[in-house]
């Protein structure tokens, strides 16, 4: 295998890994959005719409801060008792669940 072939192989794996990471994080964001929607008393189309809002926030603010701040603000406004730490713990749990779902698909 030549150096050029190895370089192409490395680049292809990098692109694949980045796409996989994006899909896993997008799934995690939807899962946390649906969880938060349930806590807010939303179901059906309202829950899906809320999850889409969470996904949109993730594109606006890099990292998890935007998601945590949105959910925490919505919880505070609705009187839902969940801390910043609890939301972050759910993000971690949903990341593992999302990875399992994506890799199984």
Image: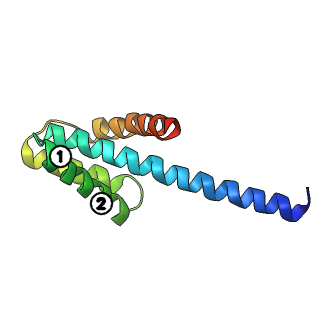
- In 3D space, how far apart are the residues under numbered discs 2 and 1 (Cα atoms)? 15 Å
- SS class of the residue under badge 2? helix
Asked whether, in this view, residue 67 is left or right of residue 101, the answer is left
In the image, 17: left or right of 4?
Answer: left
| Other residues around mark 1 within 10 Å, as few (<14) / some (14–19) / many (≥20) | many
How crowded pointer 2 is (Cα within 10 Å; few <14, some 14-19, many 20+) is rated as some
Disc with the residue nearer the chain's start (2 vs 1) = 1
- Residue drawn at x 76%, y 57% is 9
Mark seen at residue 57? 2
Task: In the rendered view, tell whether residue 93 sits above or below residue 33.
Answer: above
Quadrant of res 88: top left
Q: Residue at x 48, y 41 (%)?
A: 102
Task: Residue 47 in the image: state x and y as whole percent.
Answer: 17, 46
Residue 99 location (% of width, % of height): 48, 39
The residue beneath circle 1 is 47
Q: Nearer the viewer, mark 2 or mark 1?
A: 1
Residue 59 sits in quarter:
bottom left
The disc placed on residue 80 is none
Between 58 and 80, the one lying in front of the other is: 58
Q: For mark 1, give the secondary structure.
A: helix
């Amino acid at each position: 295998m030549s150096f050029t072939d190895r370089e192409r192989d490395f680049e292809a794996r990098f692109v694949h890994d980045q796409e996989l990471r994006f899909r896993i994080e997008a799934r995690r964001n939807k899962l946390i959005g649906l969880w938060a929607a349930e806590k807010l008393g939303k179901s059906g189309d309202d829950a899906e719409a809320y999850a889409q809002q969470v996904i949109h926030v993730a594109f606006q603010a890099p990292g998890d801060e935007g998601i945590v701040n949105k959910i925490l603000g919505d919880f505070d406004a609705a009187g839902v008792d969940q801390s910043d730490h609890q939301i972050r713990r759910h993000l971690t749990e949903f990341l593992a669940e999302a990875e399992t779902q994506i890799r199984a698909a």
